[in-house]
């Protein structure tokens, strides 16, 4: 099962939902803004994708931060900010078969799902490990 993390009303999320539904891919949606979701998953996401891939510095939330909050950003500060402001996390984050995909790309989504399906068919059902950025 694929878990899709993000914010339902985001345009990028809508594209990802439409792609998943058009391709008949079942998924579970988890909203970043629900209490505890980001704090529970962010350390693992950071290990797989890195804080630089997760931090959305193009969005409105980033631009609304005070200049001193954005200055000299490092891993520790970025993770603190993402927990405090979950909308700072790029969308969507897809967790599937031990892999993590940050952002939306129909081509990368297709490759990830193909790899996941192949791993599920393989003896032992081992998932391919790794991370992708879009």
Image: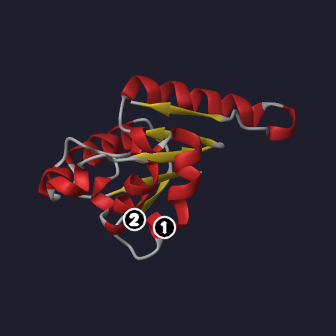
Residue 44 locus on image (x, y percent) = 59, 53
Type of colouring = secondary structure
> In the rendered view, does 111 fall on the left or right side of 72?
right
Residue behind mark 1: 39
- How far is the residue under mark 2 from the one under mark 1? 6 Å
Kindly indicate whether the residue at mark 1 contacts the one at mark 2 (C-beta within 8 angstroms): yes
- Which quadrant holds the C terminus? top left
Question: Which residue occupies 44% across, 31% down?
Answer: 133
Image coordinates of residue 35 in percent, x first then y, are 41, 76
Of 35 and 68, nearer the camera is: 68
Q: Is residue 126 at least partly visible in the picture?
A: yes
Q: Residue 83 carries which label?
A: 2
The foreground one among 45 and 18 is: 45
What's the residue at 24%, 51% (across, down)? 70
Task: Report whether residue 100 is seen.
Answer: no
Residue appearing at x 24%, y 48% in the figure: 71
């Amino acid at each position: 099962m694929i878990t899709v993390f993000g914010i339902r009303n985001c345009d990028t999320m809508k594209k990802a939902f439409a792609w998943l539904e058009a391709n008949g891919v079942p998924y579970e949606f988890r909203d970043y803004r629900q209490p505890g979701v980001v704090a529970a998953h962010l350390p693992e996401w950071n290990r797989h994708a890195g804080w630089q891939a997760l931090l959305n510095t193009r969005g409105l939330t980033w631009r609304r931060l005070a200049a001193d909050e954005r200055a000299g950003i490092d891993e520790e500060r970025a993770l603190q900010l993402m927990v405090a402001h979950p909308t700072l996390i790029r969308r969507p984050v897809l967790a599937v078969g031990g892999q993590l995909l940050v952002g939306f790309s129909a081509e990368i989504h297709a490759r990830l799902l193909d790899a996941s399906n192949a791993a599920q068919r393989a003896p032992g059902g081992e998932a391919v490990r790794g991370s992708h950025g879009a």
